[in-house]
Image (cartoon, helix red, strand yellow):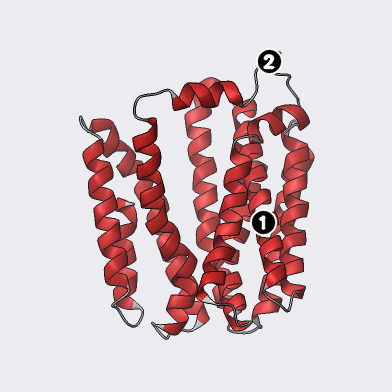
Amino acid sequence: MLYLYVAAGATFGTIGARGLTVPLYAHQLGASRFAVGALYAAATIAAAALSLPSGILVDRFGARKLIGASILITAASLLATSATTTVAPLFLWQVLGGISLGIMQSAAFSAVAESVPRSKLGRAMGWLTLAMQAGFFLGPSLAGLALSWIDIRADIALTAAAMALAVPAALVTSNTTQRAPSGIGLKEPLLALSRQRAFIQITLGLVGVTLVWGTVTAFLPVFGKEALGLPSSQVGYLLALQAIVNGASRIPAGRIVDAARERWKIVIGGGIVWALAATLLGHTTGFLVPAVLLIIGTPFM
């Protein structure tokens, strides 16, 4: 289990570091603001596209093989990014990075579920998500700190070395495979989901709030450099701070949701507060005020 937690933390750490270094590097290469946003979208779309068939991949190939594939793809995409000197190829490496994230996430959850008794599954999943959030915190923190001594291309290449921490998990994780009953694929569960009464409304709401979240996340590195005038290390600290608050707010937020009679009020209120925080963020300067806004707004998201 420890190896799985370390592997998940290492993978999500590289994703967090990539969220800092790739926008800064693309901006350095002369990418437009549209291109910076599209680079972020390329990785997230690839991860999202893989989320539907990922369970089938785990059943077909086993968690061990998928963790190994994620390690190789992540390291290769980072090394390729560091060797790229134009903007266009970065999109391909971002897509590969998103695919590797989707693979690791599915394999890690599946491996944990297979490795612990049912009575301890909730705690095991809690530790796994904590490891992921720790990666999101440490990745941009260390990547931003390293920029004080090395250039951004070397920083991206050095990030790939973190995947060595995931190798033990690829060696010891179970690799059992399963076969789904004949005729059961992606279509049946998707149709059952889409027939639920609130499906369209919830889908539109999720798209709306994640548009705000994704916009801030994609442009925060460039915004920190251009508008806030911060050094790269402090931009990394902003991303890390956001990850810390994100992880720390999960348990109390879950308790609030469990206790609520009408959960839609939490969704509407949380989305409004985060949108206001994002709006105010665009009118700030320096490090302290943006940090306070992220600390206040992120738990509502």
Which residue does the image show at 41% across and 64% down from the upper left? 216
- Split into 4 quadrants, where in the image is the N terminus? top right
> Compared to 159, does 56 lie above or below?
above
Residue 169 in view = yes
122 left or right of 262 in image: right
> Compared to 53, does 82 lie above or below?
below
Neighbour class for label 1 at 10 Å: few (<14), some, many (≥20)? many
Residue 6 in view = no
47 left or right of 210 in image: right
Disc 1: which residue: 95
> Measured from the top left, where is residue 130 in percent x and y?
49, 47
> Measured from the top left, where is residue 127 in percent x and y?
51, 41
SS for dot 2: loop
> Compared to 60, does 106 lie above or below?
below
Which residue does the image show at 41% across and 55% down from the upper left? 211
Residue 183: image tag: 2
- How many tags in the picture? 2
Q: Residue furthest top?
A: 182
259 left or right of 59 in image: left
Q: Earlier in the sequence, mark 2 or mark 1?
A: 1
Please name which of the two marks, 2 or 1, marks the residue nearer to the observer: 2
> Measured from the top left, where is residue 273 in percent x and y?
24, 56
In the image shown, does 33 or 11 lie closer to the viewer? 33
Residue 262: image tag: none
Q: Amino acid at mark 1?
A: Val
SS for dot 1: helix
Residue 55's quadrant in the figure?
top right
